[in-house]
């Protein structure tokens, strides 16, 4: 199961509790797990199956965030020998212990929780590029990670493309590699973190709808999940997924 694969979690200090809550979903693949976080906001997970590495600086978006992400990709290929990498942010996970086989069947494809991006500013800034966003999780081979890293010098920062998920689209296009969305996935605001700032009423309403969407999709077989920020919601989605995968 899940041959020659490492699970990677990209996060920062404010995500520590969230990563701990989601840790069973990272460990259940039976693969080594690495937590990557910035130097100025490190995360340390004390578990025998987890390696902690720090690199780059904390930033939510912009050139610093993009360079940190690039640094983490470089760490992945420089420090670890595996041929496959399932990469998460702290609010994403694969709900099934078995990582989908189709990902291994096309290992040099950049797989992501890909969604359409209809923002006019984004799309005006990238003529000729696919109008999509590559959100977590991401699955790629060592060859693909190296291709993204090698393409980075050709990608210039654009203020209208400040998010990491848009930067990954730029890298993929510059690298000339194949990309594809996961076949069974859900990408919507599923749950607010109960460990962070209190949610506004608008956020509560949005996440209530998102949780129901997530549960419905999990019952239908969606296994690549984003964005889910609470242990309670993770458990609810897992229970729904098991109804169709007992």
Image (cartoon, helix red, strand yellow):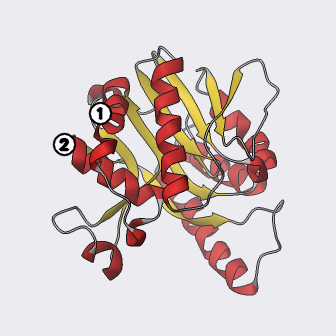
Question: On the rendered structure, is 228 left or right of 213?
Answer: right
For this rendering, which residue is in front, 243 or 170? 170
For this rendering, which residue is in front, 48 or 142? 142
How dense is the environment of label 2, judged by Cα within 10 Å: few (below 14), some, or many (20 and up)?
few
Looking at the image, which residue sits at the far bottom? Answer: 201
Tag 2 residue: 176
Which of the two discs, 2 and 1, labels the residue nearer the N terminus? 1
Quarter of the image holding residue 21?
Answer: top right
Q: Are marks 2 and 1 in contact (CB under 8 Å)?
A: yes
Q: Is residue 38 above or below residue 216?
A: above
Q: Residue at x 64, y 46 (%)?
A: 238
Q: Position of residue 192 (x, y in %)?
A: 72, 66
Q: Residue at x 39, y 55 (%)?
A: 167
Q: Residue at x 61, y 52 (%)?
A: 240
Quarter of the image holding residue 8?
Answer: top right
Q: Residue at x 55, y 67 (%)?
A: 213
Viewport quadrant of the C terminus: top right
Q: Secondary structure at mark 2?
A: loop
Tag 1 residue: 147
**Observer able to see residue 97:** no
Question: On the rendered structure, is 32 left or right of 192?
Answer: left
Q: Is residue 84 above or below residue 168?
A: above
Specify the label residue 38 is tagged with. none
For this rendering, which residue is in front, 5 or 164? 164
Q: Is residue 6 above or below residue 158?
A: above
Q: Secondary structure at mark 1?
A: helix
Q: Position of residue 197 (x, y in %)?
A: 82, 70
Q: Is residue 104 above or below residue 61?
A: above
Q: Position of residue 29 (x, y in %)?
A: 58, 26
C-alpha separation, residue under disc 2 versus residue under disc 1: 9 Å
How dense is the environment of label 1, judged by Cα within 10 Å: few (below 14), some, or many (20 and up)?
some
């Amino acid at each position: 199961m899940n041959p020659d694969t490492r699970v990677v979690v990209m996060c920062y200090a404010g995500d520590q509790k969230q990563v701990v809550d989601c840790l069973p979903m990272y460990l259940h693949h039976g693969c080594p797990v690495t937590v990557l976080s910035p130097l100025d906001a490190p995360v340390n997970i004390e578990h025998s199956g987890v390696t902690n590495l720090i690199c780059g600086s904390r930033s939510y978006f912009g050139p610093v965030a993009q360079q940190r992400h690039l640094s983490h990709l470089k760490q992945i290929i420089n420090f670890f020998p595996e041929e496959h990498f399932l990469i998460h942010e702290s609010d994403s996970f694969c709900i099934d212990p078995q990582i989908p086989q189709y990902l291994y069947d096309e290992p040099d494809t950049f797989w992501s929780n890909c969604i359409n991006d209809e923002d006019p500013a984004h799309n005006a800034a990238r003529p000729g590029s696919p109008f999509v966003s590559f959100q977590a999780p991401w699955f790629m081979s060592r060859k693909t990670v190296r291709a993204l890293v090698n393409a980075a010098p050709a990608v210039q920062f654009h203020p209208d493309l400040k998010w990491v998920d848009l930067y990954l689209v730029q890298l993929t296009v510059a690298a000339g590699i194949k990309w594809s969305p996961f076949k069974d996935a859900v990408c919507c605001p599923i749950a607010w973190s109960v460990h962070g700032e209190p949610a506004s009423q608008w956020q509560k309403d949005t996440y209530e709808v998102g949780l129901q969407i997530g549960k419905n999709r999990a019952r239908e077989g969606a296994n690549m999940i984003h964005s889910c920020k609470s242990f309670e919601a993770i458990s609810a989605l897992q229970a729904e997924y098991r109804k169709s995968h007992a």
